[in-house]
Amino acid sequence: MINSWIHRLVALAQRRSGAVLAATAVLTLFFGYFALRIQIDPEIGDLVPEQAEVSALLEKYGGQEDELEYVFVSVESDSLLAPEGLEGLARFEAACAGIAELEGVRSGITPFDLVTFAKEGKKLALVAMSPHGRSPRTPEELEIFRGRLFADPHARNLVIAADGSALGALFVIERREDYTAFLDSLREIVGSLEPGYTTHISSQLLFSHVAGRYLLQDVPRFVVLAVCLVLLIFYLSFRKKRAVVLPSLVVGLGTVWTLGLMSLLGFPLTFVSIMTPPLVLTLGSSYSIHILNQYFRDTAADGAADGDVSGDAAGGFVRAITRINKTILLASTTTAVGFASLVTAAIPQVREFGLATAAGVLICAFLSLTFFPALLSRLPPLKERHRRRVTESRSSRLMAALGRRIGRLRVLVWVLLAVVAVGFGLSLSRVRYQTDFTSFFRRPEKAVEDNLFLAEKFGTFIYVYLSVSAPGMERNYFLDPEALKRIAALEETYRAMDDVSYCASFVSYLTAMNRVMSGKAEVPERYAMISLLARYFKLLAAGPDGEVMMGKFVNQDYSRLTINLRVYDSAAGSYLFEESFKELKEKLEAEAEAALPAEWQPEIWGSTLSMLYLSEVLSRDLLLSALTSALLILLITSLSFRSLRYGLLALIPMGTGIMLNFIIIALFRIPLDVVTVMFSCVAIGLGVDDSIHLLIQYRRQLADPEAQAQGAVMARTLRYAGRPILLTSVSLVAGLMILSWSSFTPVVYFGLLVSLAIVTTTVGALFVLPAILSRAAGRAAGRGMKR
């Protein structure tokens, strides 16, 4: 039924070639219009999936972290706070003022205007760190400035490094679509501080900006390299102009249609989907190889003799394409299923990549069965020498020789499969997941170096929060001295932890104010004193920089209190990543449980806690998408072959390749991250294509009495199927190796892993599967000889 439908479709494309070409041109203009308008989304932070538990706590405590962006500017010099550094401090103040005036800057904290406490007579006063809220002008003002900076515990690791070697200013930025102009102005202002200061700009914005620049560089580079490789492979394979130009048109149009469809669906080009254009180009070329191989093999024989164009050449190529349609349909369907199985992933960028690439694969298959025949119908038939170039090629002869001898390797193949299975089982425990986003860039990047400087000197701006609630949400509960002393004791424990760089809360400000008033850095004994200081705290929180400084320390009726913690990896002077982050969270929870009453319901929360689940999510996605892909492909192949046995046989080379890949991943400690974790389901979809082609040809030869009589079932199977399997594998590997030129390490690893999987599955299709099938082929040959 499908063969009949495809035959009619190809015949229609041949008869109505003008209409097909016109319709293709119109659709290409339509999709091309939208392809030119596809958006770029360089946000690396979006690769951290949302977690229901984390989101629920954010909603409960009113966390608004995702609504703002932050920029931290720091300077260091040998004379930072020395008298000779006064001129430099004035320049830093001017730079901070210039940044504050940039469009989109909502508020900021500088070392000069950060509010601290001072005693004026018997009263507590809120004053700026530097006299008059500006940079010190005299040595006397400098001394006051320096004294306040080092005395105020909230200034340390906020506007001055703990070792006093660097000053910093923090700015809150409104979210927007494009930060390019802002970052250009920011760099210009900060650059004016050099020489004299070593400057650093730290922000998630810079990671995204650099990622966006690389995305714009990599996409055209990938496309150009992919086109060049496709042209080269087709020329070397067929040595005919039409075999170079026509497939290039097919995959080129398929890529344009795919990008246009992505734009229509609202799928931007991201850190992950940057791989879609080269993959569509590469995968689309494999279908053209199968069609061309059959076209070269059949049409000259069905048509006329060398130099004669009078035969049934048009009908010949229709029959040729119809003969290969099952391979094209099954291969494209299974490949699309492999990519589409990524819809089970937790990360939106991965889901969009899977759907977009699956659509691109199907588009290329559709164009191969419509647009390609329409073009071929307008060309003269091939000559016999072109047919012989395929049928009598060295690769075809080598494949036939392999088919005659493959049965002797059957025992060895089974032994090797057993060894691979054991190695795979042992390797699973050694697979590791990469969550360090600073390692995503292949080349040294100042944005990365500046963020690592921030981590080393100031302890990062990665926040986690501990909130406690009064029993029954009792009003003014956390104005009670005894309750506050418990919080103060817990905070002291937290400050003593190496990986906590900053700890601030209502209690810490309360004790700081009390130290100024009484000389004692402790919670006041009297409720009246606490109530008085609480009013000062509200004044401080109501200031223009309150949202930066205060966060959500306490609610309006003092029935809930929150400790703000900044965390980092003190041993490495870097960001905390998954395992270390989990250990610290467990310590924070354990200390809170030991120090606080259970009825306070202490809870750790914050958007950054989503990182704790990243390996768990990646592991789940790897297993779920791979199983989904394998089961769907098993169902498709079993239904297509009408045999569960053949469906299972189709998975053997792919399974062997995947197992070998995991062994290599474990041996070379290749990390799996949000990109490389996709390799298994992609490899499953691609790796089964060769098995499908070989099994289709094997069943044809098995049903051929002549092949059985000659005992040549496997030899003829490999003679006909081996060459296109080799060519498509070379094409796919070459196309995927283009990804090794990517600016992103995970993309490079993805290309290498899928390429390796294709190589191993090709070996499985040409050696392992024929060896397994050879016994059945031998029995068929015996029956043929008896007849």
Image (cartoon, grey):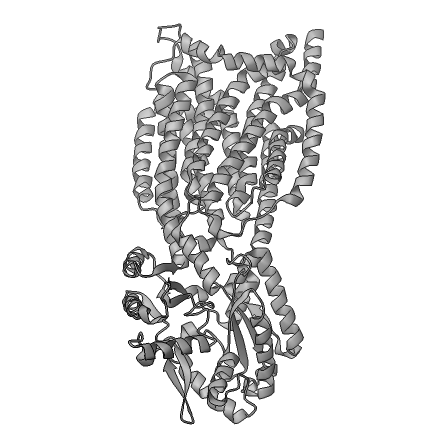
**Where's residue 659, x and y in %?**
63, 35
**Where's residue 412, x and y in %?**
70, 22
* Left or right of 181 on screen, residue 298: right
Q: Is residue 406 visible?
A: yes
Compare residues 140 and 650 and report the one nearer the observer.
Answer: 140
User: Does residue 288 sit above or below 736 in this rendering?
Assistant: above
User: Does residue 479 sit above or below 671 in this rendering?
Assistant: below
Q: Is residue 365 visible?
A: no
**Where's residue 730, x and y in %?**
48, 25
Compare residues 535 and 653 and report the one nearer the observer.
Answer: 535
Compare residues 290 and 350 and report the one nearer the observer.
Answer: 350
Residue at image coords 51%, 89%: 530
Answer with the quarter of the image where residue 125 lies.
bottom left
Count of labels in the image: 0
Answer with the quarter of the image where residue 12 lies.
top left
**Where's residue 634, x and y in %?**
61, 35
* Left or right of 611 on screen, residue 180: left
- Image quadrant for the C terminus? top right
Residue at image coords 61%, 29%: 653
Residue at image coords 68%, 17%: 407
User: Does residue 429 sit above or below 491 in this rendering?
Assistant: above
